[in-house]
Every structure is written in structure tokens, then in C-alpha cells.
Image (spheres, rainbow, N blue to C red):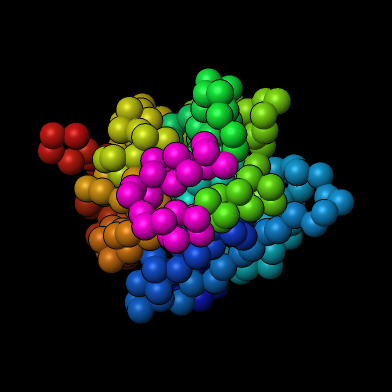
Amino acid sequence: MPNLTEVVCLSASPHLQVFNRPLLQSLTQHTPIAQWEYQLSPDEPCSLDIALALLHDYLKHHDRPIHLIGHGISGLLALLYTQRHPERVRSLTLLSVGAYPALDWQTYYYTQRHLLPCSRQILLTRMVDILFGCSSKPMTKTLVKILGQDLDDSLSPHSLVKCLNLIPIQVKVPLLVCGSVDDVVVDPHQLRSWQYYCSEDTSKLWVCPGGRYFFPYFHPQQTGEQILNFWKSLPSCRSSHSSEKLFLPANF
């Protein structure tokens, strides 16, 4: 298993960190995980380039390539960093990141804002159902507040004016892509499309049977097992004569 300095989970959405905890708790039973956090200050411009520069300042002090993990916008940040500095990344694990990697829950939200004549509060309530499934009234209220805070405070290239669109990005490191079969934001088509931009020898795709956009929160054990098995399968941990193939589950 990797050591402390070899595994870094990115968190660019401070209000969504709570949904990372079950997976991190599952993984830390087997290996230490370092968490890199980024939070915008009130007077700071929202810039992926600034975040990438700060991330590089942090990772350049590591004496060996690291395993990067990221969900949603944090996954996009991890992907962009890996594209720029592949020599510093041992492997990349993307959670709820499609082949067109800028598509996230905020993109979906702003698209719906343009299509539906309803208030922010009503739409955020609808987003809770889309992202999490049915919840009790108190829980829905709590989740609406969290999503609203994420809209206001997170590192995001999206707004009511314009949403960032990125073409698929290829990286030269082992890649694990994980998503959920019932996620309408990063849907099965987005997940399947990764197979056209990945190396068959070093890339894997796993689709969780449920959990929607935040599937690592609802299925941390299954997700953690997939990540751990992926790390174990890398060349340094196995025979160089074997190879992993990009796969899709049956009936996917």
C-alpha cells in the first residue's frame, strides 16, 4: 500500500468535504491519506490556474510521484494538474468526472436555471433529489444550504453567465474513473466515453450500482475497495507481465 506522502485527496469544495469523509475513513484503514484543501478568500479571483499553482507548490516538495484522488471539481483540478505535471503523479483516481471533465453538479444547476422559471431555493430543493435521492424535510433543508454555500464559495469555473466547457483530456499516468449508474450529472454515456481517451493497459473504469453523484458517500466501502485494488494492480505492486484493461460492467 502507498505511504502517507504518496496519496493525496484534493478538496476544492470546502462545503462538500463532508461527503468525502466516509470514503477517506474507509481508505485510511489501509493506508494514510493526505488531504489538500483549497478555499477561496473573499477578495480572491476564482481561477483554476491559481489553484493549480498552489497545488504544485505543495506537491513539488514530495520526493516521489503521488496518487491523486478527486471528486467533481476537485477531480477536474487533479486531472488538469496531471496533464501539466505527469512526472509528479503515480496514478489518478477520478470520482464523478466524465470524459468532458468540466461537467459537474453546478453545470447541471445553471443549465436548469436557464430552462426552468423557478427560484434558486426551489431549484436547489430539486437538485437535492437529483443528487441524493429522497430525503426527509430536515435533511433536505440541510442539503439545500450546503449546495447553496458551494455555489457561493467553491472554486468553480461556472456561473449564470457562462459555464466552462472542456474537451476530453488524455493523461499519461494510470487512471481509475469511478461513477454511478444512476447519476444524471455524469451519466453512463459520459463514463463510457472515457474508453476512447484512455490507455487500455493502464486505465480502469468502475461503475457503482447506485449512489448518484455522491456515490462515494453512500458506498464508501465498495468505492474504497476499487481504489485499493487499482493501486495494487499498478506495475510496482505486481508482475510486469500482467496488464489491466479498461472494462465496463455487464449490462452497462
Residue pictured at 83% horizontal, 50% vertical:
44
Q: Is residue 55 magenta?
A: no
141 magenta-colored: yes
Residue 44 in view (yes/no)? yes
Instruction: Tell me which secondary structure the magenta stretch mostly adopts.
Output: helix
Which quarter of the image is occupied by the C terminus?
Answer: top left
Give the x, y percent position of residue 139.
Answer: 43, 60
> Please, which residue is most extreme toward the left here?
250
Q: Give the side of residue 233 with respect to residue 35, left or right.
A: left
Residue found at the very far top of the displayed protein: 115
* The image quarter in which residue 203 lies: top left
In x, y percent, where is residue 62?
62, 68
Front-most of residues 17 and 202: 17
Q: Nearer the viewer, residue 54 or 222?
A: 222
Residue drawn at 46 percent across, 77 percent down: 32
Q: Image quadrant for the N terminus?
A: bottom left
Question: What x and y, as percent, mark residue 161?
Answer: 70, 25
**7 versus 115 height, above or below:** below
Q: Nearer the viewer, residue 123 or 16?
A: 123
Please provide percent x and percent y for residue 225: 27, 63
Between residues 155 and 88, which one lies in front from this camera angle?
155
Residue that protrudes farthest toward the front in the picture? 137
Q: Residue 243, can we see it?
A: no
Q: Which residues are magenta?
A: 121-143
Q: Residue at x 57, y 54 (%)?
A: 145
Q: Quadrant of residue 27?
A: bottom left
Q: Residue at x 27, y 40 (%)?
A: 181
